[in-house]
Amino acid sequence: MVMWWDNGRCQHIGAHRFTLSESLGRPVRDGMYACHILECPFRNCVNPAHLYEGTPQQNCDDKAALGRQVSGDRHGARLRPESRSRGERNGKVVHSDEFVRHAVACVRFGATQTFVARALGVSRTTLRDWVAGRKRAGLSPNQQGEGAKEKSDG
């Protein structure tokens, strides 16, 4: 990060963008990126000969070509799922896993989402997301519905 004062205000710009602007003799155009050539493996390198003005798509393509974009099985959430704070392990959680399972089971037994939400003091939107499995990712849909399956079998 490069900082300087301009008309009494502190300005900030990334080192790559600053170096490229200096070598071009003009600012990098709006919407364009200061991209790094693929042949240089050092991401902190600010050699002007290794930088070029590129589109966001070119920047993403370069990142993928260098193996710096992790997704799928290489993503941290898949490699180390225990490092993610899910369900009750999340410090911001308000309701216990058991509470969520109970609420979902009530809906699966046939109670309306509005009735269950009012009875338990949660928003209908939150309850809808629990039932659909969009919230509380630590509870799989199977875990969320265990109560309903157990009672419906007997």
Image (cartoon, helix red, strand yellow):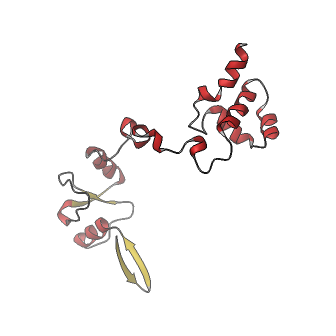
Q: Looking at the picture, does residue 39 appear above or below residue 51?
A: above
User: Which residue is drawn at the image coordinates 59% and 34% (left, top)?
Assistant: 139
Q: Position of residue 57 (x, y in %)?
A: 35, 49
User: Which residue is drawn at the image coordinates 67% and 19% (left, top)?
Assistant: 149
Q: Which sits in the foreground, 130 or 150?
A: 150
Q: Where is residue 15 in the image (x, y as percent from the top left)?
A: 30, 68
**In what quadrant of the picture does the C terminus appear?**
top right
Q: Quadrant of residue 30?
A: bottom left
Q: Is residue 55 left or right of residue 135?
A: left
User: Which residue is drawn at the image coordinates 24% and 60% (left, top)?
Assistant: 52
Q: Where is residue 99 in the image (x, y as percent from the top left)?
A: 70, 37
Q: In which quarter of the image is residue 19?
A: bottom left
Q: Where is residue 93 in the image (x, y as percent from the top left)?
A: 63, 47
- Residue reaching furthest to the bottom: 8
Q: Which sits in the foreground, 21 or 139?
A: 139
**In what quadrant of the picture does the N terminus appear?**
bottom left
Q: In this view, does 139 lie to the left or right of 38?
A: right
Q: Looking at the picture, does residue 17 appear above or below residue 37?
A: below
User: Which residue is drawn at the image coordinates 72% and 32% (left, top)?
Assistant: 102
Q: Which sits in the foreground, 145 or 124?
A: 145
